[in-house]
Amino acid sequence: MQLTYDDAAESFRTEIRSWLADNLPAGWVEAAERGEALEMTAEERESFNQSWPSKLYGGGWICATWPTEYGGKGLTTLQGVVLAEEFARVRAPMRADFFGDTLVGPTILQWGTEEQKKQFLPQILRGEVRWCQGFSEPDSGSDLASLKTTATLDGDEWVINGQKVWTTQAYVADYCFLLTRTDPDAPKHQGISYLLVPMKQDGIEVRGITQPDGTAEFCEVFFSDARCPAENVVGGVNNGWKVANSTLAFERGQSATTGYRRFEEEYRQLVAEAKRNGAIDDPLIRQRLMQYYTKIQILRANGLRTLSTQLAGVKDPSIAALGALNKMFWSEMHQRAMELALDIWGAESMLVNAGPESGSWPGALRERRREGYPVSPMVSTFFFSRSETIWGGTSQIQRNIVSERVLGLPKEPKPA
């Protein structure tokens, strides 16, 4: 679990710190070092949000681990870690279209043709296209390989029919990286392809799914003879299951040494409120706070373990399954933590301004909630935490992965 930063990594850290100090608003770094957010007017915040992506792009920090021939800086894995750590240290936002930068972009880098790389990667880097992920279906969530959406080749295009659900930000997406069945006669894991589908066409209908807090980030997407260029298959026809597993690995592996920080921020806010309102005097509250803190440190240690073994080139099934273990661990940990938050704030949780403005689910939700259902950012976080043991792989599925791939237990029996 020992992670060693060599001289080159530390020199790179100095470069990043200098760039952040020069480009963030005056006072930002100092406020972050005090554990605070810089106070900004609405106009200053809007100006920052508008200018920051172009500064990131100009600095070359967007997708900086990508090869230079595709617009990245060609950073090593360790340099990429240092970059993430320094941005997290001062709470500097990394741009972005998460789906493009973190999921489909690396997938295209690994599996895409040269033509696909040249077409899509520069657009992702420049923020010219937005993406959504078309995996889950109404009857194919945890058992993703049972998906029923079909794609049939018609000349130089795929014709797509079916339905996807829980498709985040589909209403603004330009493209969807879509899992669809292209060989109905093949075994279910072998007849799936990974397509890059244009979203702005008549054959696609997007419907928002309103959540308890009034937001509708998740969507249903209906495909009715939608069209996709034949060459937009990533990784080859009927090889989509392997490609999709790469995408999921990117989703879980990007924050090995920084992912715990958002929970530490929440922990500090919980302790501060418990001290303010006297809840800290309750021994059960103190015990639950320390349980949360302990689990955050376990999450941090597991991240270091994953990264250090990756850098050392270690091949071990238990290490490969750490992504599943960590996802299960933090999602269940965070649900308990948000239940603790409600207990600390007590009846005050029902007020629209209860709780902090920052945390793992930021106060921007306050601006997107629908009229008639006011809810504070903290309670938005509570609601969202209920979904965290489902999206990205349910806890039940993660337990199956660990039990079968690490412990060598028999596979779960299939229903008759």
Image (spheres, rainbow, N blue to C red):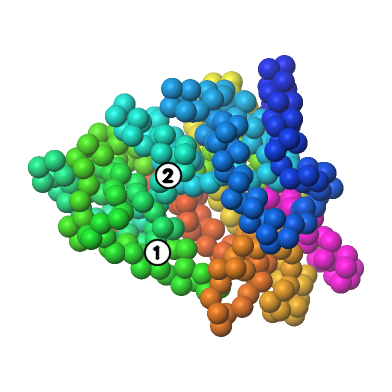
In the image, 379 versus 301, the foreground residue is: 379
- Rendering coords of residue 132 (x, y %): 40, 52
The amino acid on which the numbered mark 2 sits, given as a three-letter code, is Glu
The residue sitting at 67% across, 56% down in the picture is 45
Q: What is the magenta range?
A: 261-285
Question: Is the residue marked by circle 2 packed among few (<14), some (14-19), or many (20+) residues within 10 Å?
Answer: few
Q: Residue furthest top?
A: 7
Say if the magenta span includes residue 342. no
Q: Is residue 265 left or right of residue 212?
A: right
Quadrant assignment, res 358: bottom right
Q: Residue furthest left?
A: 155
In the image, 373 versus 25, the foreground residue is: 25
Element carrying mark 2: loop
- Tell us which disc is closer to us: 2 or 1: 2
Residue under label 2: 128
- Rendering coords of residue 96 (x, y %): 53, 46
The amino acid on which the numbered mark 1 sits, given as a three-letter code, is Cys
In the image, 305 versus 249, the foreground residue is: 249
Q: Is 355 drawn above or below residue 267 in the view shown?
A: below
Identify the disc placed on residue 219: 1
